[in-house]
Amino acid sequence: MAAKNCPLCGQKTFVEMRGQYRVDPPPNIPGGTIVIRDASWQHCESCGEDVLPHELDLAIDRERYHRLGLLTPEEIRRVREKTGLSAVDMSHLLGVGEKTYTRWENGHSLQTKASDTLIRLVDRHAEMFALVDAERQPGRDALIARYFAELEHLKGGNRLAMAAHGADMSTETWEAVRERLRALRKPKGTSP
């Protein structure tokens, strides 16, 4: 195949290459030179510029993620889709900016190991994030206090409340729930 003009230097020394593509990653990526076998790319024999096809870029990126022990953008997207969250909701859940999260999912930047760990936890225990988020709600203590204040009233007049508070539970289960509610009701810093 005849050489083409290089888009960088303009010389007619731009050729198609095939074989092992080697690239030295930055020092923060362990493992030394990245080698992609059976690759094809374009190379300028005058200025040394390489132009990589999308597939080769993806293969290099996959190796970077693998060496760093991070989820790939595809895996991050899969976790979000599995939870049914939008990218905006996922960014809020993780406590990062919307653009930052979108860059991770699109492969335009690498997530930190701490963020990667959070994403993995969302994948395994998404319900825990909802519980933690509920604990952060400013009116939560007042809501719990009002709930306890109205328990007797609700139990006597509402069949659902009665079922939720002991009418259809075994004595052992009711006692366990009651003890847990007492523990939750105690002010912080007091002994049991």
Image: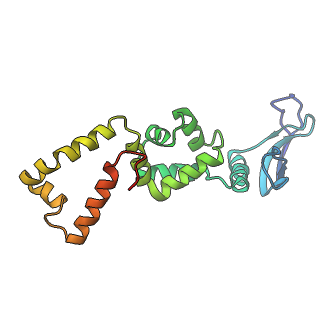
Most foreground residue, 54 or 168: 168
Residue at the right extreme, as displayed = 46
Tell which of 43 and 121 is nearer to you: 121
Q: Quadrant of the C terminus?
A: bottom left
Q: Is residue 113 left or right of residue 126?
A: right
Colouring mode (rainbow / by chain / secondary structure / one colour): rainbow
Q: Please determine whether, in this image, residue 163 is positioned above or below residue 153.
A: below
Residue 62 locus on image (x, y percent): 68, 53
Q: Is residue 177 left or right of residue 138?
A: left
Query: Which residue corresponds to the image point at 41% horizontal and 53% vertical from the top-left?
Result: 191
Left or right: 154 as drawn, with respect to 5: left
> Can you tell which quarter of the image residue 45 is in?
top right
Question: Residue 78: x, y in percent?
Answer: 50, 53
Point 17% across, 49% down: residue: 151
**Which residue is drawn at the image coordinates 60% and 49% (left, top)?**
116
Tell me the residue at 54%/37% (across/down). Answer: 96
Residue 19 shows up from this direction:
no
Work out which residue is located at the far front of the displayed protein and give it: 191
Q: Is residue 46 left or right of residue 57?
A: right
Examine the image and state in which quarter residue 51 appears.
Answer: top right
Q: Above or below — where is 168 with respect to 112?
A: below
> Where residue 91 sits in the image (x, y, percent)?
50, 39
- In the image, is residue 109 above or below residue 18? above
* Residue 32 in sight: yes
Q: Nearer the viewer, residue 183 or 132?
A: 183
Image coords of residue 40 (percent x, y): 78, 51
